């Protein structure tokens, strides 16, 4: 079977049931779990660790899933916030205990001696105090309002590095979070009780900027220390060090939870301060160049005890302000050059850093295609940090800085990738090449995306030396983890042949041996990449589940992209699986057309350019759409796209279907009509339909029930919807609980809510003669 099945399945989808009768419970009843933090966010090889996972809708979580080998887990306990009645019952019990303590041992008016106050009473008061602090309507951070304790067993041979942890309940699979397997001894403080701290950065809720020093934890180097920062807290870690030790202190904080929706700047901004035993500052750091996670490197001046202080840079804090800090004489790579090389070859690279066993390494690209390799090294059995090395298929050269090239461009033959450096502050690198008329030129710098501090500035100069185009920062939506996009890109159509020059510099006028870059100069190769959101699709048999697919278009590619599935064994189908020409995304729906035979499986979303067989079929990278600082959104990659079947695995027989064949066509201001069947509708039952995240200019004007069908009336504003526009509409239908009961089993007294299949629409192009008469008027 062709792995990219056709998405034109409307004849089939007309008979696909979207839900198991109108007796389906409200959507909230089936809400899948979401998780916001894991603490500790890692553990050592061969150890068993109990972690707290905070999130929402965790009450029925019963399974732990990992992407990666060597880990198993089980749910130990659940921590649910109190409802109003439970809180009131605790208040009343607290009042009784308070009165018992007041009267303990006293003699009443009738000569009776009141019961004594016991240790059990004291313990119960402490329990009530802890429970009462976990009340639902006092929870200021609903994203982490609930928690579960998870016991994780790490195999001794488990590879060091990150895994993806997800929780699973009868309602489906959660989003992923990072969990690290380490090789050093691990130290962790007691997890903060859920709901003991205010939310961060809420409007009108400025955190108290006052340090609250915690008692120091004593560790022996080397070690990994796990911690949580609550508002105003400063964690302290005490260790003994010898004179002359080359100490590396490396933090993982933002890399564990890249974006926090209600925090500014959008993550835990850790800051490190190292003091000697006299309290004097030895070193301080609150970032690692452009990386928000700080790294301290210091040569210990004299033997003694040292204290590392860990805090948020502006004294915020909450349970999801977590960190892992590795301390010791650990290998650390601070520079790698060149930053990339040709795929299919061996490459020798230069390394610089701390505690490295060698300044050279060989990277094997003989079995690799274009892409990135995460490289790390070891010294005395200890792993270093990882750095990225890029592989590509175009010819590559090394920039050679000479006195001549400081003023005259170095000659290039296209296509080419130049591996170079901005050697010193103010340095400008010049490159010349022959450009051909009627071609589109692409000039791109890859530096920041390979952990280089270069903030590139590109200029394209014409044959007469005039500036034809320039660019500082070019947004790469595929680099969702970068806190600052700083790589440059120029796409320029050449109208005449001649000698052209590329001028490359650092926008901040910085430079040095670590300021490496890769400069790619070539003619345009229109292509695309795909991203799919969310990475966990929890699908009830027979329902339609909305999914968003993003097209990252390259080099001017504007064509339509057809989408298909691989890995579902023919059990799923797509509705609306076409990204229209020129559009950057589409919302489609997935539904079951047969029992998949498994309750959870990996899925691949594929896309191919319609009418262009020269481009390869691309696999969509699964992502989570994360919000940063109340406003910004980022596509953060996940390891796998997973479908989990929930509820009854058997698809229902009676369908809800479109009675009018899609697409929905608009012509000017004329309304468009659509009829939807409702086979389980009860007499007298009313329905409401909502257009979910509809495109600007298209509205749902009316919904009328006619027997066992709904008539929907749509309108499009030609001033807002351009002629020829195409896309999908996602419709959410809700019914009230009124009306007479239907046949047995079709009415359980719960209001239904369901999503219709994605509905394609088209804005018809109006004839020019008509358009001209409308514009000119009488």
Image (tube, rainbow, N blue to C red):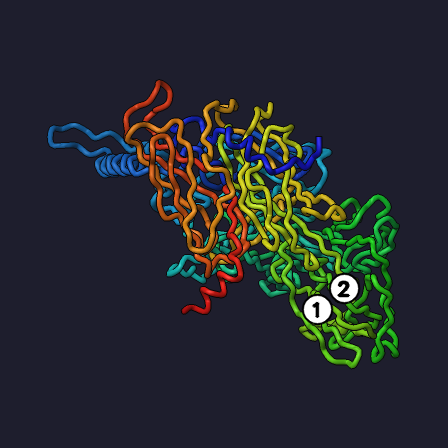
Q: Position of residue 676 (x, y in %)?
A: 42, 35
Identify the disc placed on residue 735: none
Is the residue 608 above or below the residue 168 in the image? below
**Front-lying residue, 193 or 623:** 623
Q: CA distance from mark 2 to mark 1?
A: 9 Å
Is disc 1 surrounded by few (<14), some (14 to 19) or many (20+) residues within 10 Å? Answer: many
> Which residue occupies 56% across, 48% down?
586
Q: Which residue is labeled 2 in the image?
A: 517
Do the CB atoms of the residues marked 2 and 1 lie less than 8 Å apart?
A: yes
Above or below, comparing residue 407 to residue 77 in the picture: below
**Residue located beneath label 1 in the image:** 456
Camera-nearest residue between 292 and 182: 292
| Sequence-earlier tag: 2 or 1 | 1
Place of residue 222 in the rendered image (x, y in percent of width and height, measured from the top left): 69, 48
Q: Quadrant of the N terminus?
A: top right
Q: Which quadrant is the C terminus positioned in?
A: bottom left
Please name the residue shown 51% across and 37% down the image: 545
The percent coordinates of residue 288 (x first, y second) are 65, 61
Who is closer to the viewer here, 194 or 560? 560
What residue is rendered at 68% in x and 59% in y? 556
Judging depth in this view, the residue of 301 and 501 nearest the camera is 501
């Amino acid at each position: 079977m062709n792995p990219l099945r056709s998405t034109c399945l409307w004849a089939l989808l007309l008979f696909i049931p979207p839900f198991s009768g109108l007796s389906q419970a409200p959507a909230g009843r089936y809400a899948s779990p979401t998780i916001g933090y894991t603490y500790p966010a890692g553990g050592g090889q061969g150890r068993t660790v109990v972690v707290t996972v905070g999130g929402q809708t965790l009450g029925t979580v019963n399974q732990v899933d990992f992407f990666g080998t060597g880990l198993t887990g089980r749910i130990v306990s659940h921590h649910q916030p109190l409802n109003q009645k439970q809180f009131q019952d605790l208040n009343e019990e607290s009042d009784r205990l308070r009165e018992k303590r007041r009267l303990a041992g006293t003699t009443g008016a009738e000569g009776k001696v009141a019961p004594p106050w016991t240790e059990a009473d004291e313990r119960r008061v402490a329990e009530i105090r802890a429970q009462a602090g976990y009340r639902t309507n006092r929870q200021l951070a609903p994203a982490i309002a609930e928690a579960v304790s998870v016991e994780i067993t790490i195999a001794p041979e488990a590879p060091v590095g990150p895994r993806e942890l997800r929780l699973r309940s009868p309602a489906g699979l959660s989003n992923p979070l990072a969990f690290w397997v380490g090789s050093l001894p691990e130290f962790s403080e007691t997890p903060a009780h859920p709901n003991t701290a205010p939310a961060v950065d809420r409007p009108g809720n400025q955190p108290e900027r006052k340090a609250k020093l915690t008692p120091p934890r004593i560790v022996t180097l080397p070690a990994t220390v796990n911690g949580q920062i609550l508002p105003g807290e400063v964690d302290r870690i005490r260790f003994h060090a010898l004179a002359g030790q080359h100490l590396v202190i490396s933090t993982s904080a933002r890399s564990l939870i890249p974006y926090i929706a209600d925090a500014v700047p959008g993550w835990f901004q850790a800051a490190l301060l190292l003091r000697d035993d006299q309290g004097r500052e030895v070193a301080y750091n609150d970032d690692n160049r452009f990386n928000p996670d700080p790294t301290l490197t210091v040569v210990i001046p004299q033997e003694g005890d040292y204290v590392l202080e860990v805090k948020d840079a502006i004294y915020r804090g909450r349970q999801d302000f977590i960190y892992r800090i590795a301390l010791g004489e650990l290998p650390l790579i601070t520079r790698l050059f060149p930053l990339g090389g040709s795929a299919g070859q061996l490459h020798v690279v230069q390394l610089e850093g701390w505690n490295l066993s060698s300044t050279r390494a060989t990277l094997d690209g003989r079995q690799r295609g274009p892409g990135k390799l995460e490289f790390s090294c070891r010294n005395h059995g200890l792993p270093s940090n990882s750095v990225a090395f890029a592989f590509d298929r175009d010819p590559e050269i090394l920039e050679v800085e000479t006195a001549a090239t400081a003023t005259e461009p170095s000659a290039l033959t296209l296509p080419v990738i130049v591996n170079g450096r901005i050697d010193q502050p103010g340095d400008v690198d010049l490159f010349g090449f022959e450009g051909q008329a009627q071609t589109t030129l692409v000039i791109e710098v890859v530096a920041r995306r390979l952990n280089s501090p270069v903030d590139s500035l590109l200029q394209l100069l014409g044959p007469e030396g005039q500036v034809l185009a320039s660019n500082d920062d070019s947004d790469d939506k595929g680099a969702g983890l970068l806190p600052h996009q700083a790589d440059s890109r120029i796409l320029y159509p050449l109208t005449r042949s001649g000698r052209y020059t590329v001028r490359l510099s650092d926008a901040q006028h910085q430079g040095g041996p670590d300021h490496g870059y890769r400069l790619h100069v070539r003619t345009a190769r229109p292509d695309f990449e795909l991203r799919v959101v969310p990475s966990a699709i929890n699908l009830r048999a027979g329902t339609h589940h909305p999914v968003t697919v993003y097209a990252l278009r390259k080099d001017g590619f504007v064509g339509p992209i057809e989408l298909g599935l691989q890995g579902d064994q023919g059990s799923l189908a797509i509705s609306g699986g076409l990204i229209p020409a020129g559009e950057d995304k589409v919302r489609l729906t997935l539904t079951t057309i047969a029992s998949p035979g498994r309750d959870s499986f990996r899925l691949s979303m594929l896309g191919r350019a319609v009418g262009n067989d020269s481009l390869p079929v691309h696999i969509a990278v699964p992502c989570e759409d994360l919000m940063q600082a109340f406003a910004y959104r980022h596509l953060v990659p996940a390891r796998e796209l997973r479908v989990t079947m929930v509820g009854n695995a058997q698809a229902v027989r009676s369908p809800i279907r479109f009675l009018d064949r899609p697409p929905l066509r608009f012509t000017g201001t004329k309304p468009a009509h659509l009829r939807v069947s409702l086979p389980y509708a009860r007499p007298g039952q009313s329905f409401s339909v909502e257009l979910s995240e509809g495109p600007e200019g298209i509205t749902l004007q009316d919904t009328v029930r006619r027997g066992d069908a709904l008539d929907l009336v749509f309108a499009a504003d030609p001033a807002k919807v351009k002629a020829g526009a195409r896309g999908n509409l996602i419709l959410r239908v809700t019914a009230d609980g009124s009306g007479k009961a239907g046949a047995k089993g079709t009415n359980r007294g719960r209001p239904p809510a369901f999503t219709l299949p994605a509905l394609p629409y088209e804005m018809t192009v109006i004839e020019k003669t008509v358009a001209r008469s409308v514009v000119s008027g009488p």
